Amino acid sequence: MKLEKDDLIKLYKNMVLGRKIDMITIEGLATGKVTSFFHSGQGSEGLAAGVASFLRDDDYLYAHHRGHGIVYLISKGCSGMEFLAEHYGFAGGCSKGISGFHSVDPAHGIMGSSGTIGSQFPLTLGWGLACKKNGRGQVAVGCFGDGSSNRGTLHEAFNLAAVWKLPIVWVCDNNGVAQYTPIADAYPKEDIADLAAGYDMPGVVVDGMDVLAVHEVVQAAVARARAGEGPSLIEAKTLRYRTHSEGSPDVFHFEPRPPELVEAWKKRDPIKSFAEKLLAQKVLTPQDIEKIDQELQAEADEMDRLATASGKPDPAIMADMIYAE
Ligand SMILES: Cc1ncc(C[n+]2csc(CCOP(=O)(O)OP(=O)(O)O)c2C)c(N)n1
């Protein structure tokens, strides 16, 4: 898929809006508005927008917990207002405020998520099987972190997806550390993409800070899946900018990465570097960048206002959320 000017701007806006909502969520923790915790996704916006911005509404997506998937979700069409309201435990949320942070938006192929690392593999496998049975050319995209790559569920799902040639794209967000465990302490090789060879599927490594590079490899894997050729594995090397999770006790904030490593990666910020590219290619002017920033800030603030205004859910809806008629 060749990206036209509007497509490039769409990618850029998804990244910028996602970071603004990420920041509002962090502020919400400080003020007590967000009562759960939050795993900020700052640093992986290029990966998430590159994966999800050009999927079909009826494709399935499991966005993993980093940033609670916000850039993935808004890129796939989910509303930022619903994301914020869900985190506030308010009625405007995607799950009517009942879950605290898990987003469900079936109209955009977001079927839910889980706090259990590794649960995305069998879930994505099931959606991939549904896609194949439906025969409508849908794909299922299953995102996970490097820390999930040693779960047994990964190997079981990779195996069945390959044997059944399911239309699945597996995407590993390898930010080098799982909470406090550097990937080198838990995995013997350099690249998680190497796991693909054991399941007879393509495995590629991509620079997760480069939204266009991510977009290109994802589109190739999606085309392969839609053509009935089976699953692929993409490993994107990224960085999380902040601590593992916001709002958790101090003991959870141990930082195993040397500060100079984090600073070096931050110089390649996915939003800033994409903006520089768009400026160099004359897709946008500095004034456009400024205008987009202001407009998206206003949009994010309005989403926050609407999310807050939606208020607490009526506890009586809880049974309806659990039981079917
Ligand atoms: C089965 C399970 N084990 C442990 C945890 C606690 N936990 C939450 S996030 C996380 C780190 C996951 O690392 P990774 O998958 O690399 O994602 P990242 O947080 O680095 O984005 C851990 C250990 C959990 N939620 N589920």
Image: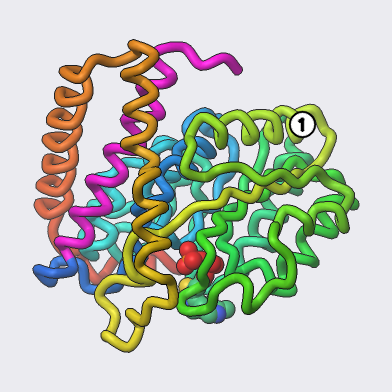
Q: Is residue 165 left or right of residue 297?
A: right
Judge from the rendering whether residue 286 lies leftward or rightward of residue 254; answer left or right. left
Instruction: Name the dominant secondary structure of the magenta segment.
Output: helix
Q: Secondary structure at mark 1?
A: helix
Decide: few, some or many residues near mark 1? Use Cα within 10 Å; few <14, some 14-19, many ≥20: some
* Kind of residue sitting beneath label 1: Arg
Q: In the figure, residue 173 lies in which quadrant?
A: bottom right
Which residue is found at the position 27% from the left and 85% from the top?
Answer: 250
In the image, residue 142 above or below residue 66? above
Give the x, y percent position of residue 139.
Answer: 67, 38
Dot 1 corresponds to which residue? 224
**Taking the image as drawn, is residue 102 in sight?**
no
Q: Is residue 241 placed above or below 12 in the rendered structure? A: below
Whether disc 1's CB lies below 8 Å from ligand 1 is answered: no
> Residue 58: x, y in percent?
57, 35
Q: Is residue 171 magenta?
A: no
- The boundaries of the magenta stretch are 1-28
Residue 185 visible somewhere in the drawing: yes
**Quarter of the image with the N terminus in it:** top right
Q: Position of residue 201 (x, y in %)?
A: 83, 46
Residue plotted at (38% across, 77% down): 255
* Residue under the image location 49 percent in, 48 percent down: 110
As rendered, which of 183 and 138 lies closer to the eye?
A: 183
Per the image, is 16 magenta?
yes
Find the residue positioned furthest to the bottom: 251
Q: Is 286 on the left-hand or right-hand side of 77?
A: left
Vertical comparison of 307 with 136: above or below: below
Q: Residue at x 62, y 78 (%)?
A: 185
